[in-house]
Amino acid sequence: MLNLPILRWGCPYTSLEQDTVVHFITGETLARVSRANTGLIGRDMREAGRARQVLTEIPIPELIAMMKAAADRYLNDTLPMGDGEQSPEDFARQQSASTGLPEHMCRANMKKNHFVLSSMDKILEALTRGLDLKILSRGFGVEHRGLMVSYQTQAPVLGLVLPSNSPGVHTLWLTVIPMQVGLVLKPGPQEPWTPYRMAAAFFEAGVPREAISIYPGLGDVGAEVVRHTNRSMIFGGTATVEHYKGDRRVQVHGPGFSKILLGDDVVDQWEKYLDMMVDSVFANSGRGCINCSGIWASRHTREIATALAERLGPVAPTPPEDPESSLAAFTVPGTAGAIWTQIESRLAEPGAEDMTARFGPRLVEKEHCGYVRPTVIHCDSPEPELANTEYMFPFVSVVRCPQEKMLQKIGSTLVCSAVTHDKEWQRKLIDAPQIDRLNIGAIPTIKLDWLQPHEGNIVEFLFRPRAFQAALEAVAV
Amino acid sequence: MKTTAAGLKFAARLQEAKARLDAHVREVIEWHFSPETGCPFWLEFASKLAWSPRNEIRCFEDLKKFPPFEDEWLRGGPVRRWVPKGLAGQPIYIFETGGTTGVPKSRVAMQDFRIDYEMFSETLPDEYFPRGANWLMLGPSGPRRLRLGVEHLCQYRGGICFCIDLDPRWVIKLIKRGRTQELEIYKAHVIEQAITVLNAGHDIRCLFTTPKLLEALAEELEKQGTSVKGMGITGIFAGGTEFTPQYTRFAMEELLGEGVYMTPTYGNTLMGLAGSKPVSAEDGYKITYYAPQPRAVIEVVSFDDCNRVVGYGETGRVRLTTLTRETFIPGFLERDEGEREPPYEKYPWDGISGVRPFRQFAATTTVGVY
């Protein structure tokens, strides 16, 4: 068992209160994690400026090199972890044991993080649109077009309130340190592993310890991180999204409601896209906001739902160490049952039908955890509530809706894969403000291009372009 | 095992305290159930019982003969049904608890709050709470006992109490509605008032406040280049919401530092004030409270059987019994839980540590600044 302390600008601090992280099958305690009290954050944030200062003393190319070194250490090395150490295998096992995600998926997520860290130069070049990175350090400079530009940092640190259920989200904050901005991390209660392991890899690679704080704790700690950082990223449900709506200091990542739209011009050949639909719904056990939760078409929806149900309906839970395991467990007691109860009550609405019912019960309750097996719902219109719902397991509604009504009805959509050759409709899709990431063609919703922004550009979130003129020959920096 | 002299002496003190409690119970029962001195509520209650409290309640344990006290009985009027005939004609205060939505619970009072705070005063070290020093009451105002209690405590010790306005019901509404920004504005408004008073030359040395407000006050003072200690505060009486050992350690090590004494308390409108055993780093900042026996008794009882006191160190729900001439409340199940602690020298009766919201209510309980 590991004891994980709070990290206060890199310094370990053991709280008098601890939370335990337990194995979802055996109930074994995997770690005791120090619980921060909110006051610690207020005190420490007085020193937030120091985090940026120590990072600006290191040129960005050097920080990028550190990220590349950290990538390898994160993926391959045994790293210090609290009062012990952790090998890459330990990491995958522990992450799986507390989050319920099968071990091979945890290993796949490690590779994703490794890829992002290793490709940091290309990712920053893409996100800054080729900006000379010295301009971010200095705050101003002359661009290759000969124009004076200035980018002003909006916060010395980025606060992150991280989730427990989707280790994939960590890729979103890996670009922050090389932009010379510090990190204030509040890990998800079941997933302290990535923040601690990543911090250990960063420190081993030479990132100054003063640049990173980690505050595990309850909900009040997350709120305090948001309160004390001028820029923060928070992951949560619809209520969290609503709560922080309009607060420009906060970038909220909520449910994605990602969708596949089949155009009238291709829908008669829907079988051609079945694999792409299955991948979009099922990859990573349907946990991500980029997993597809809605497939919309004007006709053949019942056939599509039937075919998806035949592919996904028989899937059943297997042990997390099984390399073929494809279903994640809900490790918080009662969660799986509550989700299924909600789905069942919504199925009472006319127009919604569970197409996977004939493959046996969806809810599987175990001693310390629960599963909900893949579920395919057919909706004969966009009206039933289940037509636009997202759950943290492979769940999809196949919705019948005329093409000309789709953009009115789909609502907020993080990833939209629109399969169509209809140029006029493509134009409307491109202009639709409710769609964030748009794929035109048979591209699975889960296929990300790391060189493109996700739910807003992190560079624009952390740096504000502004006017800057200098009359002096040499300005201060 | 050999019994030491000190051990024998302590055992005698335990017995004395128990005998004193039993005698106090008999006296209070006689008072509340006598037609000459009792209150209408208990007289009517007794008339429906098949047994006589005056005859059958001879010791504290006998109070279990009463059915569990229902907190609904404290809501709504006429509130005079709680006024003992023996105290008729005295000026009556009404103190409320809860009430963010719906009818609050209320308790009538005449002198109890003064007596409780005078008793508490004896636990305060004069070095940090100097006699004659002025106080700031930075806590909930309105229909709350705490506001008058702290002011009386200050006056009793010879000082003048400065107060600010704070409406905890509004705070809880803001939290429930997710109005974080408004909440911050309100908190800033309260802290601004406090700092204005502290800066106004009143020579304030002592403070009552809640854990969250202490944190906010310290944070704001530091922004202004000073500190709680820098403002001349030497003694802090803190309470109102849950105190954890980690918070206490943080407050002592980082918010206050050497030279400022903080005493956590556990109290409410019904009980009065439970003081704490002195908190120290050596003891892991553990906070153990002891009720002001015999005027109030805290028991830690089983979650399944409220008449069964749990073993020492075991967790249970707080059951409170109030035994004063003004108020008799037997076996009131509080919305808190904690661990039962053994008696100690200063308080030769059971205590409680780790007080926190009762797990069954915790998810629905909103804790505000108060």
Image (tube, grey):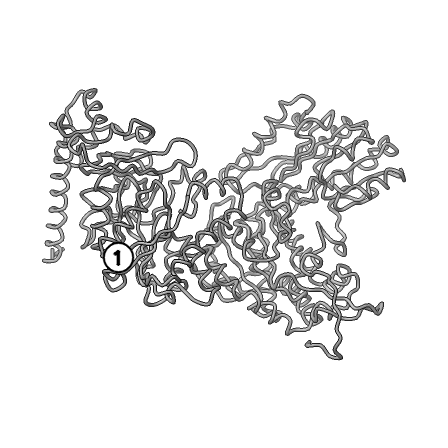
Residue A171 versus residue A367 in the image, above or below: below
Crowding at dot 1, Cα within 10 Å, few <14 / some 14-19 / many 20+, comes out as many
Please state if A24 lies on the left or on the right of B241 as rendered: right
Q: B169 or B292: which is nearer to us?
A: B169
Please state if B211 lies on the left or on the right of A239 as rendered: left
Labels in figure, total? 1
- Per the image, the residue denoted by label 1 is B159
Q: Position of residue B325 (x, y in %)?
A: 17, 37
Residue A270 versus residue A168 in the image, above or below: above
Q: B22 or A73: which is nearer to us?
A: B22
Residue A415 versus residue B74 in the image, above or below: below
Q: Position of residue B203 (x, y in %)?
A: 32, 63
Identify the image quadrant of residue A382. Answer: top right
Residue A206 versus residue B57 in the image, above or below: below
Q: Chain of mark 1?
A: B
Q: Residue shown at 65%/56% (left/top)?
A: A110
Secondary structure of the residue carrying tag 1 is loop
Amino acid carrying label 1: it is Gly
Q: Residue shown at 22%/56% (left/top)?
A: B157
Please state if B106 lies on the left or on the right of A254 as rendered: left
Q: B158 or B45: which is nearer to us?
A: B158
Q: Quadrant of the C terminus of chain A?
A: bottom right
Q: Position of residue B139 (x, y in %)?
A: 37, 49
Q: A132 or A274: which is nearer to us?
A: A132
Q: Residue shown at 21%/42% (left/top)?
A: B111
Q: Residue shown at 10%/50% (left/top)?
A: B12
Q: Position of residue A377 (x, y in %)?
A: 69, 29
Identify the image quadrant of residue B366. Answer: top left
